[in-house]
Image: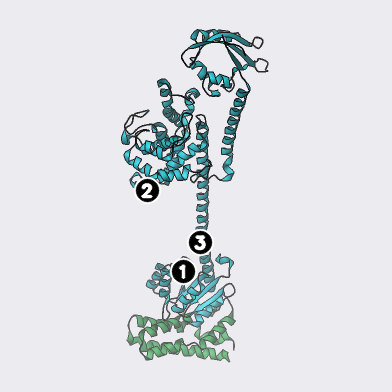
Chain colours: A cyan, B green
Amino acid sequence: MAHQKVQTLLIADDSEINRAILSEMFIDDYRIVEAENGRAAIEKIQELDGCLTALFLDIVMPEIDGFGVLEYLHLHQMMNEFPVFMITAETDMKMILHGYDMGVADIINKPIEPIVVRRRLSNAIELFLNRNHLASQVAEQVQLIRRQADELRSINISIIDTLSSVIEFRSGESGSHVRRIREATYTLFSNISRIRPDLKLDQNAVEAISSAAAMHDIGKISIPDYILNKPGRLTAEEFEIMKRHTVYGCDILESITVLKQSELYQYAYDICRYHHERWDGKGYPDGLKGDEIPLWAQVVSLADVYDALVSDRVYKKALSHEKALKMIAGGECGAFNPTLLQYFLSMADYLRDTLYTSSDELGASQTSPLPTKYTAVSTAAENLLTQLETERQKTLLFSLLSDDIMFYIDFRTDTIEYTRRCKDLFPGPYRRIHATDYLQNNSRLLPEDLEALRCELKNITQQNPDIQTTVQVHMDKGEYRSFKLHLYFCFSNEASPERTGCLGKMEPVNEQQN
Amino acid sequence: MEIEEVMAPVVDDMETTIRRFAGRIELWEKFLLKFKDDLTYTELQTAYELSDGPAMERAAHTMKGIAANLGLQRLSDASADMVRSVRENRPDLFEKNMEAVRREYQAVLDAIRKFAD
């Protein structure tokens, strides 16, 4: 900066000769400006306005003396801009000390030794330049660190959201559900941290709570598919299993050692475990009551209930914003902290406007801006979701083309796919995952039929790949009907072939063949 | 006449003096000529006659500095004495000190005039 321009020295001394001598010393290397007293010196300093490299200051001057100039510099906080040299014939120690007290860089006695003064001047200038340069370097580094911290935060958010979305996809939730829960929690807690300073929630805490909120249902990955995607009501037994997703979520979190050291962990644990607790103590898993339930879990609970009400589900259509709020306020969808409920209701319109009115579900998010070079993570997840979607459509086509009651069990992916006719007779999804789970718990076949099948299975080889038998099947209306069951097993093309899947066909007995 | 010869009577340490001007005698000469027209002595004289203590102190102090810079040690010392007597509030010494300054100043002027011609 200054060293790229011509360096300027200001010499303030009431003696023309003294000024001349000093000037002579430096005229070859610097631009010289002179002042014959303190007042003139101050004027020149103002004129030079930031372009002054160093100041030579005599003490004894008329009008305003050297100390007067130093006071002016202090007043305008200029002592750090350039070195000040006190030039004096003074040997009075008191004055010298006073000069140092006022922050002069050096005291030079008359008669002046040119070589010494030149060296001291260049030393002092160097020091000041370095000091200022260092300050600006530090400022630059701080900015860089801040930018990198922001980027890291964005990556964290997108990884958490993406993984949570993949897990939620199994139960039919979309990625935007996770994002909405995160953002609703963020909005609600940003305000809470302001109106409840006693909670001491800083910006980091609010962001950690929001990320934790995104992970509230990760425990669902441990819930079998036939329960997770059951279109009808769950039995008492099935519901007990479903409730465990709270605790399973905590198990998963506990197993991630790195996570435990972060601020995020405690919030994530609490939210996973307690987001189904109720204010009246009738929630699960631990039956916590009132303020025993951590505030963040309560908030996520509310946000989750609202989101569920205003979204389409397999078993119900989306409710209107007003109806949802009415139900929540009326205590029809869980018991909540009355104060928190009031607060939520006051924020509800804002949440709807910012999170729910965009017809494009993947609309702009305010809490997790994604730097473009980090889309690889979310792209992988999107690819995965697209693949799953394609598989769904394939299954649909397969079922539409066939008029038979058929199904295919794929052992490698542990899935079952059904034709439409099959689905008509035995209501359920077109495609079932966790097939093994399902088949083990399936109660449609009589135990003796199942046992017989298991025996026959042992005889299946590539040369002998099929079973034909008659079975009694439990229909939904409670009766049993007879079916001819054909099972055809497929094998891999390896040296020791393995069963890769099984095609099944059922023909009702005692029905006319058309 | 050579400047060194001429100035010798009023300069105690010629070598140091010239060294201060980075060996450039012509610079010293230039400033000595300027000194001839310098008004500090006149200021001191006026202040003395008006018994203006602060003004005397200032002028004597300035004289002390200039003289020292130019190697005119005796003139510088006499000026220093004057400064001290004002600061220590010794008006009884004013006359004696003023006389000493006048004497030294005159000697310097005489010497300068010699090589100025």
Say if A400 sits above or below B35 in the image.
above
Q: What residue type is disc 3 on?
A: Asn
As measured in the structure, the alpha-carbon distance from the residue carrying label 3 to the one carrying label 1 is 19 Å
Chain to which mark 1 belongs: A
Q: B47 above or below A87? A: below
Q: Amino acid at mark 2?
A: Arg
SS at mark 2 in the image: helix
Q: Nearer the viewer, mark 2 or mark 1?
A: 2
Q: Does the residue at mark 2 contact the one at mark 1 (Cβ under 8 Å)?
A: no
Give the residue number, with chain letter if any, for mark 1: A106
Residue A169 shown left or right of residue B102 in the figure: right
Tell me whether the residue at label 2 lies in contact with that at label 3, contact meaning CB atoms closer than 8 angstroms: no
Residue identified by numbered label 3: A132
Residue A266 pos. (x, y %)? 41, 36
Relative to B75, is B25 on the left or the right? Answer: right
Lower position in the chain sequence, tag 2 or tag 3: 3
Question: In which quadrant is the C terminus of chain A drawn?
Answer: top right
Amino acid under disc 1 = Asp
Q: In this orientation, which residue lies closer to the viewer: A443 or A271?
A: A443
Q: Which mark is residue A181?
A: none
Measured from the top left, where is residue A230 in percent x and y? 48, 24
